[in-house]
Each structure stands twice: as C-alpha cells, then as structure tokens.
Amino acid sequence: MGIVNVNDDSFSGDGSLDSYEIAQQCRAKIAAGADIIDLGAESARTNREAISEEEEVARLLPVLERWQEIVTEVPRRDAEQLNTPVLSINTWRPQVIESVLNSEFGSQIGLINDMSALAYPETLEIMRNSAASLLIMHSVGLPKQDHSHLQWQNVVDEMKQFFTEKLALATAAGIDKNRLVIDPGLDFAKSSSESLQVLQAIDDFSSFGCPVLIPLSRKQFVGDAIGEDEPVERDAGTVACLPSILGLPASIVRVHNVAATWQALKTLIQFNF
C-alpha cells in the first residue's frame, strides 16, 4: 500500500494540494509496485487542527475524478502486482465516507481506511450499504487528539480484546468478515516501546482471519531506534522491519517509499530470508 497525502502538512513532508502532482505521485507508486493507493486528505498529526468535512471531500474528489486516467496509464511492475490497483480512502468521519462513496466516482473506492477505530456507529451503516471493504485501526479516543500519555497493562492482550469487539460490531451490522481488514495502529496511542511489542507479536493478530495491515513507514519507533527525528530519513529503518512480517497470511504493508519496500520484499522472498 502506497501512501499519498492530499494535504500540505503531512508529517513526512510529501503531501500536496495540487491534483496533478497527486496524480503523478499515484502513478509513480503504482509503477514502483503498489497494489493499493491509500489516499488521505487530512494529516493525522495531533498538533494540527482538523479541517472541515467539506474541505476534506473537496481535496479528494479531484483525485477520484482522475483515478481511471491514473490507473490505465501505468505499466505494472511485475506479474504478481494487481492489474487494477485498489483505491483506499484514509479518513475518520462518517460524513466524508458517505460523501465520497456516494459521489459519481464512489464505485472506484475499494477500501475505507477508518483511523477512528469505529468511533462512529454511522460508519457501520454506511459501510453495510457499500461494496467497499473496511479497515479498522486500533486506537483510543478520536483522531487529531494526543493520546501519547496512555499506558497499557498488556498492550497486545488489550488490542486483541479490542479487535474481538470491533469485528463483532462490524459483522453484527451486516458487514461480511471477508470485507474487513485490521490495523494495529503502530504509534497511535502507543509509546515506541509498545509499538515494538505489538510488531514483535504481530502474528497473534492473524488469528482473527482478516488481512492485517502493517503500518511501518517512517514511524516514531523506527526513528527512536536509529536516532532520526526527520521522518523522511527513516526509510532504511522502515525496510529493516520487513522480515518481521514475512510469512504472515494476507498481510499488507503501508509505506511511503514503495520502490525500496518492493525491492526489499522481493529480495527477501527470492532468497528465502
């Protein structure tokens, strides 16, 4: 999954509000090997005010309008890459989810990446009436708020209980389990040491029978390990984490630097590392 930020305050400094530049970013990441493009119009940074729902939708729609043009012009990197890349929308507010899914371009959206941890019951109703899949990220409280002060008695066990409850809510709402993805939310409401604990126990989450998204890219726990404050300088540290996810069933790795990740995974798999 390649990350594309339709904003001007991304923590990694690679966002843009120019739809042409965003289209070019999407093409480059697909050409580099991305099977999924995760499009987010609002930074998750807690030291930035939330933008309005209307502004978020206004940033997304021009890219959705060009999506078919984007995907039909890009050659695939190899035979294993999806012929048609999946479009994921990274958001957290039901009004935005409903607006993009109900737009004239909504049928192109394959995944809603809900970073609110299903904070809003309306999201389940909207998703029940949609063909798109739903990603449930682990966190607490609402996005755009600082939860770094929280402490967990046993972060892995408490997360497993969280996903048990959230998956039950989703299936009870009529969303087929085959349409659900889970995300451990590394760095969200977790210290670097807790994120590392979760990554080391990541195989535990495959027991839910859903694809597991692994959000490794340029995270704080990577920066702390290598003493690097600048997120854009953490790609080598990100790639070094990849062996920890090899062998997981149906896993997705979410990254900024698709080319480096693709090369590293291909090498690791080819040589049986």
Image: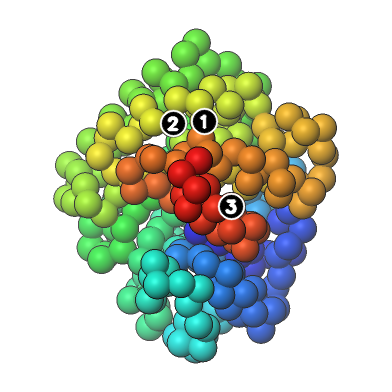
Q: Neighbour class for label 3 at 10 Å: few (<14), some, many (≥20)?
A: some
The residue singled out by tag 3 in the image is 264
The reply to whether the C-beta atoms of the residues labelled 2 and 1 are less than 8 Å apart is yes
Disc nearer the start of the sequence (1/3): 1
- Element type at mark 2: helix
Residue 98 position, x and y percent, is 38, 65
The residue singled out by tag 2 in the image is 202
**Mark 1 is on which residue type?**
Leu
Residue 243 position, x and y percent, is 53, 39
- Examine the rendered structure and indicate whether residue 64 appears above or below residue 234: below
Q: Nearer the viewer, mark 1 or mark 3?
A: 3
**Mark 2 is on which residue type?**
Ile
Q: Nearer the viewer, residue 116 or 245?
A: 245
- Image point 39% across, 47% down: which residue? 251
Question: How many marks overall?
Answer: 3
Q: Image quarter for residue 17?
A: bottom right
Residue 59 visible, this angle: no
**Mark 3 is on which residue type?**
Ala
The residue singled out by tag 1 in the image is 199
Tell me, what colour scheme is on the image? rainbow
- Element type at mark 1: helix
